[in-house]
Amino acid sequence: MCEPNEFAYVEHLEARYTSASEHVERLTPTLLAKAFRGELVSSRQDEGGND
């Protein structure tokens, strides 16, 4: 059988998982939108490419 503090630890882990999962669900569309707008990379003007 599990001890009461083991149940508390499992409940704590479940709450952290739920919170992280919700955060990822909100973050993914934001990251994809920024990626398609080209906002996830720095624009370096000194990289060359001026052929």
Image (cartoon, helix red, strand yellow):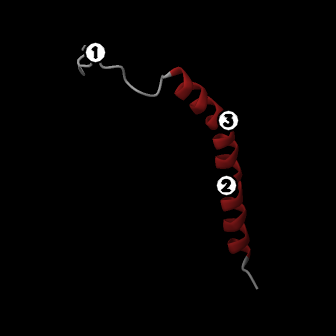
3D distance between C-alphas at marks 1 and 3 = 32 Å
Going by the numbered disc 3, the residue's amino acid type is Arg
Location of mark 2 (residue): 17
Going by the numbered disc 2, the residue's amino acid type is Tyr
Q: Residues within 10 Å of mark 2 (few under 14, many from 20)?
A: few
Location of mark 1 (residue): 45
Disc on the earlier residue, 3 or 2: 2
Residue 18 in percent (x, y) is at 71, 51
Residue placed most toward the observer, 37 or 5:
37
Residue 27 in percent (x, y) is at 62, 36
Going by the numbered disc 1, the residue's amino acid type is Gln
Who's the residue at 65% across and 53% down the image? Answer: 16
Q: Secondary structure at mark 2?
A: helix
3D distance between C-alphas at marks 3 and 2 = 14 Å
Location of mark 3 (residue): 26
3D distance between C-alphas at marks 2 and 1 = 42 Å
Q: Secondary structure at mark 3?
A: helix
